[in-house]
Image (cartoon, rainbow, N blue to C red):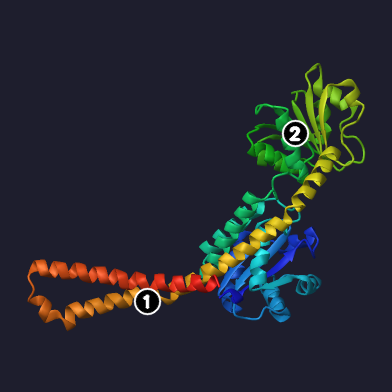
């Protein structure tokens, strides 16, 4: 059963993040492609996992997952793929089989294999991917048990180690600093730039209850997209100097090599407001002119300080790896026990039906005449005795088989 569990992985370890993006599929696409694939290539169960730094296919198949299989698989899922991309995928994709595939998945869900170790969003992504594939009819008994145990293992890792305790992304660190300043939920936010970092920051702020956002960006279309996501307003960056609605917090992250928030622009933004402002500058180099700090009361949260904290926290997380690996090994051992128990359940699933058939034959054929001569009280008592025996004959063999398995596992 377990030896049929295999996985094909395209991850950040052997591919650029931009290349991995070529393998992402939206749900409508993968439903169509995987449905046809499951039947044509000889796969009993199939699950598709896609994140920002990996695309993985989990399989239940008796077929050997070798280079030929991977080639057919890739061209079946991605018929439009370019030859050079296909060749790189076939040669560099990671293939795991049996227990190694199981251990790999446990490490993925526990975020030990992530680009940023300890980022626990992956456990939700694994769960959601499984549910989507289950609803589409791609999964069965093996993947159900595998994912169930994977989620259990990851939860234990996050609960019993410090692998995810200290934040290592500048977005989460910046937000933590912001909360330490007791910024109110009705604070006015200016977001200067709408790239990956500011988009993540904006969504993070909205998720935690902030509501007042104005977005400025060189390309208005990108500003409008982020503004829609966070229910804010969008303007071109050229309008920043004319913004006279005030602000409490500015989050800036652009790709400019020069200061975007100049002394003149900052003076125009604050006007006559003398209250202390918070500026989160996540750009490299910094977007805010250092001269501003000499003339205005500013709580500056700068990316260089956050990066130092992130490095320190990442080192702390990596100290937890051995403890995490021990939990994974323990859960692999438990997984085998559960698989054995499931085998017994499947093997003995016919017992209740067989017992009921014997009962019906006994009552209606073999002993029908004798039972017909009994009075109603005797029939009732006989029925109770037979029901009692029926339940015991169904439950006892299952219990005995499980006890034998547990005894064998403990040796």
Compute the Cα span from label 1 to label 2: 61 Å
Examine the rendering and report whether any part of residue 135 can be seen.
yes
**Helix, strand or loop at mark 1:** loop
Relative horizontal placement of residue 75, taking residue 363 as reference (left or right): right
**Which residue bears the numbered disc 2?**
177
Query: Where residue 26 sits: x, y (%)?
Result: 64, 59
Quadrant showing the C terminus: bottom right
**Which residue bears the numbered disc 1?**
350
Q: Are discs 1 and 2 less than 8 Å apart at CB?
A: no
- Residue 1 occupies which quadrant of the picture? bottom right
Query: Where residue 149 sits: x, y (%)?
Result: 57, 62
Q: Which of the marked residues, 1 or 2, is nearer the chain's N terminus?
A: 2
Query: Where residue 400 sits: x, y (%)?
Result: 41, 72
**Helix, strand or loop at mark 2:** helix
Point 76% across, 53% down: residue: 318
Looking at this rendering, what residue extends furthest in the bottom direction? 366
Relative horizontal placement of residue 402, taking residue 29 as reference (left or right): left
Query: Where residue 226 sits: x, y (%)?
Result: 71, 41
Q: Is residue 352 above or below residue 227?
A: below
Examine the rendering and report whether any part of residue 228 can be seen.
no
Q: Tag on residue 367?
A: none
Point 76% across, 74% down: residue: 90
Point 24% across, 69% down: residue: 387
Of residues 259 and 100, the one drawn nearer to the viewer in this rendering: 100
Q: Is residue 124 above or below residue 213?
A: below
- Residue 114 occupies which quadrant of the picture? bottom right
- Residue 331 occupies which quadrant of the picture? bottom right
């Amino acid at each position: 059963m377990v030896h049929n569990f295999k996985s094909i992985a395209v991850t950040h370890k052997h591919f650029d993040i931009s290349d991995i993006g070529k393998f992402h599929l939206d749900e409508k696409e993968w439903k169509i492609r995987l449905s046809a694939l499951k039947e044509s290539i000889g796969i009993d169960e199939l699950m598709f996992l896609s994140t920002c730094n990996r695309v993985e296919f989990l399989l239940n198949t008796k077929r050997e997952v070798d280079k030929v299989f991977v080639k057919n698989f890739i061209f079946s899922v991605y018929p439009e793929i370019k030859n050079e991309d296909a060749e790189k995928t076939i040669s560099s994709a990671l293939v795991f089989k049996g227990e190694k595939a199981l251990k790999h998945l446990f490490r993925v869900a526990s975020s030990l294999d992530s680009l940023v170790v300890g980022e626990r969003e992956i456990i939700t992504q694994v769960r959601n991917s499984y549910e989507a594939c289950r609803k589409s009819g791609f999964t069965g008994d093996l993947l159900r048990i595998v994912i169930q145990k994977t989620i259990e293992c990851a939860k234990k890792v996050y609960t019993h180690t410090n692998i995810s305790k200290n934040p290592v992304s500048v977005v989460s660190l910046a937000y933590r600093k912001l909360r330490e300043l007791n910024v109110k939920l009705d604070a006015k936010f200016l977001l200067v730039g709408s790239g990956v970092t500011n988009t993540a920051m904006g969504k993070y702020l909205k998720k935690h209850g902030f509501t007042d956002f104005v977005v400025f960006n060189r390309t208005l279309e990108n500003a409008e997209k982020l503004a829609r996501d966070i229910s804010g307003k969008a303007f071109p960056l050229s309008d920043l100097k004319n913004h006279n609605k005030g602000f409490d917090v500015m989050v800036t992250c652009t790709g400019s090599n020069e200061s975007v928030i100049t002394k003149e622009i900052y003076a125009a933004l604050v006007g006559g407001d003398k209250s202390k402002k918070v500026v989160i500058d996540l750009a490299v180099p910094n977007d805010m002119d250092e001269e501003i700090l000499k003339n205005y009361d500013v709580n500056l949260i700068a990316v260089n300080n956050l990066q130092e904290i992130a490095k320190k926290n990442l080192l702390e997380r990596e100290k937890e790896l051995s403890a995490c690996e021990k939990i994974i090994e323990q859960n692999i051992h438990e997984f085998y026990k559960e698989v054995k128990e499931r085998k017994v359940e499947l093997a003995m699933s016919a017992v209740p039906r067989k017992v009921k058939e014997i009962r019906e034959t006994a009552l209606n054929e073999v002993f029908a005449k004798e039972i017909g001569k009994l009075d109603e009280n005797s029939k009732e008592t006989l029925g109770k005795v037979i029901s009692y025996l029926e339940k015991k004959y169904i439950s006892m063999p299952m219990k005995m088989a499980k006890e034998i398995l547990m005894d064998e596992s403990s040796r």
